[in-house]
Image: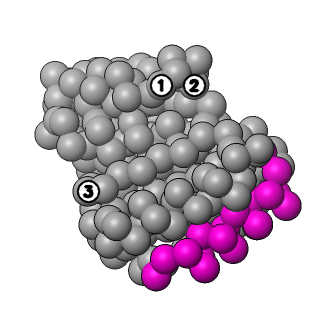
Amino acid sequence: MAEPALALLEFSSIAVGIQAGDAMAKRAPVAYLKAGSVQPGKYLVLIGGEVADVQESMASGEEAGAEALVDKVFLPQVHPSVVEAIAGGRKLPKVEALGIIETTSVAATIIAADAGVKGAKVTLMDVRMADGLGGKGFCLFAGEVAEVEAAVQIGTSTVQPESLLVRSIVIPQLHAEMEANLEISTRFRSIARGEKTD
């Protein structure tokens, strides 16, 4: 479900987030609006659709929820694999090298994932957002070492302010056992139970 534009607003208050989401829905006819609470007590509003509609809707949400706005992202030409990953899709290619970008906000993770996958020949394996992460987010890139290094460098350069970046790492020649764990899930509970879900 690739849309020409995607935006996400991240709020520290659930009540304000719901109010802002309502204002966004009323403002412009976006193709979709997904909203809900995430840990630790944040509220996310994700919209997609035509660029002008998404911009207008986002502006309304920013205005209505300014007091509780933690972070935001607007991608006028979002990469299709980012949309797929946000919706829960995971790609599991053979991993030569693995790149990880970990941030303190969901919006920063989405920005980094989009920039990295656009800027290098990598596969965006996964994007995890907030739940089970104490509000943090991370994305995983797979590919040849040089390409993964480029994706991580490009992705981390988009994380602003820099204080939102927790860590970025490139692991060349990922061990087969770690790769097998990543194929199952990135959640320990799923790994321990042998569940292939995320």
Magenta stretch containing residue 77, yes or no?
A: no
Left/right of residue 164 with respect to residue 38 in the rendered view: left
Q: CA distance from mark 3 to mark 2?
A: 23 Å
Q: Which region shows up in magenta?
A: 12-29
Question: Distance between the Cα atoms at labels 1 and 3?
Answer: 19 Å
Q: Which residue is mark 3?
A: 77
Residue 28 falls within the magenta-colored stretch: yes
- Quarter that holds the C terminus: bottom right
- Label 1 sits on residue: 160
Main secondary structure found in the magenta portion: helix
Q: Is residue 191 visible?
A: no
Q: Secondary structure at mark 1?
A: loop
Query: Tag 3: residue type?
Result: Gln
Amino acid found under the numbered disc labelled 1: Gln
> Residue 172 at x, y = what percent?
29, 21
Between the residue at mark 2 and the residue at mark 1, the CA separation in whole angstroms equals 7 Å
The quadrant of the image that shows the N terminus is: bottom left
- Kindly indicate whether the residue at mark 1 contacts the one at mark 2 (C-beta within 8 angstroms): yes
Which residue is denoted by mark 2 in the rendering? 164
Residue 108 in the figure: left or right of residue 176: right
**What's the residue at 60%, 40% (across, down)?**
71
Q: Position of residue 7 (x, y in %)?
A: 46, 57
Q: Is residue 42 visible?
A: yes
The mark that comes first in sequence, 1 or 3, is 3
Badge 2 local density, few (<14 within 10 Å), some, or many (20+)?
Answer: some
Which one is in front, 37 or 161?
Answer: 161
